[in-house]
Image: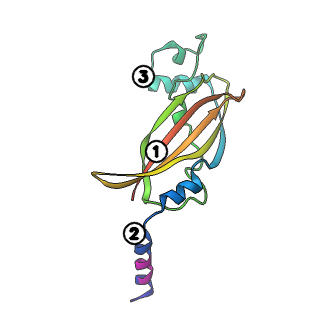
Amino acid sequence: MSTSDDAAQSSDTAASAPVDLAAIREQFVGLEFDWTTFDMNADDMVAWAEACGETDPRFIDPEHPDFQAHPNYTTHCMSVQLLPDDFPQIGNGFGIDGGKTVDVHAPIRSGDRLKAVATIADIYDKTGRSGTMIFIVQRMTFTNGRDEKVSTVDWKMIRGA
């Protein structure tokens, strides 16, 4: 057997080795791994709301007394890093977007500078018709300049096991 065959066999063995999700969860769930800021401006907020089909003036009229960002606005605010630097390769491939969940805590106003902190919220597996899939949940928590939590977005990344 050639050296390249040895490497391929070793790689196949590593890929099929069982993953200890409990140990990975223990190490990474709750770990903060990225921080960034986002400046909120009325034009972007209106464009987003209109793209969502919104008609409520609170979200599309900057002159409205309660003008604010659409409830799902922060779903487009992504961290630079998707996972911590030392996160292990689990599952196969880069993964697919498994959807987002948004919890709105307070209105986001034009002129706000939001601080976003990314953490790993959960790691778990599920078995269904497609086989076993691994779910990695990245959580972005957004606070405004008054240190009020305004939004929490959980993004599920799905990888085949």
Counting residues from the start of the chain, the first of labels 2 and 3 encountered is 2
Q: Left of 79 or right of it: where is 115?
A: right
- The answer to whether 114 is drawn above or below residue 96 in the figure is above
Label drawn at residue 156: 1
Mark 2, residue position: 16
| Residues drawn in magenta | 6-10
- Kind of residue indicated by mark 2: Ser
- Kind of residue indicated by mark 3: Gly
Query: Which of 39 and 101 lies nearest the eye of the viewer?
Result: 101
Residue 59 percent location from the top left of the image: 53, 18
Real-space Cα distance between discs 3 and 1? 24 Å
Mark 3, residue position: 53
- The answer to whether 154 is drawn above or below residue 10 in the figure is above
Q: Hey, which residue is sitting farthest left in the picture?
A: 129
Task: Label 2, secondary structure: give it.
Answer: helix
Residue 78 percent location from the top left of the image: 56, 41
Q: Is residue 104 magenta?
A: no
